[in-house]
Amino acid sequence: MRLLSLILFLVTLTLFYSLWFSDSGRVRVKDLENKLTEQQEINQALQARNEALLAEVQELKGGAGAQAVEERARLDLGMILEDEIFVRIVPAE
């Protein structure tokens, strides 16, 4: 009877060990769940960026495309029209 109890205890202990610490155990599952959550956050940020870029492309293709191109040229490239004067104000340190 004692031998049978000892064998059952060792089998139970082995099963619990594999449940918690093996490659398919609870620790591994929790680690994968954390990685999944991080990847979902990254994907959401990239999806928002893609939607913003798509909206910008739609705006450039649309009827107001010329105005959007001019605005980007002014802000990003510092371009001005021929009859305009560029004034730069440098803040004092």
Image: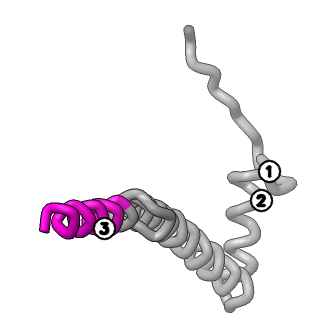
Ranked by sequence position, the earlier of labels 3 and 2 is 3
Magenta residue check for 39: no
Image mark for residue 11: 3
Secondary structure type for disc 1: helix
Q: Which residues are magenta?
A: 1-17
Q: Quadrant of the N terminus?
A: bottom left
Compare residues 38 and 90 and report the one nearer the observer. Answer: 38
Secondary structure type for disc 3: helix
- Residue at image position (30%, 67%) is 11
Real-space Cα separation, disc 3 to disc 2, in angstroms: 73 Å
Q: Which residue is mark 2?
A: 73
Magenta residue check for 7: yes
Q: Residues within 10 Å of mark 3 (few under 14, many from 20)?
A: few
Residue type, mark 1 in image: Leu
| Residues under numbered marks 3 and 2 in contact, where contact means CB atoms less than 8 Å apart | no
The quadrant in which residue 41 appears is bottom left
| Residues under numbered marks 2 and 1 in contact, where contact means CB atoms less than 8 Å apart | yes
- Residue at image position (56%, 8%) is 93
| Residues under numbered marks 1 and 3 in contact, where contact means CB atoms less than 8 Å apart | no
Q: Position of residue 54 (x, y in %)?
A: 64, 81
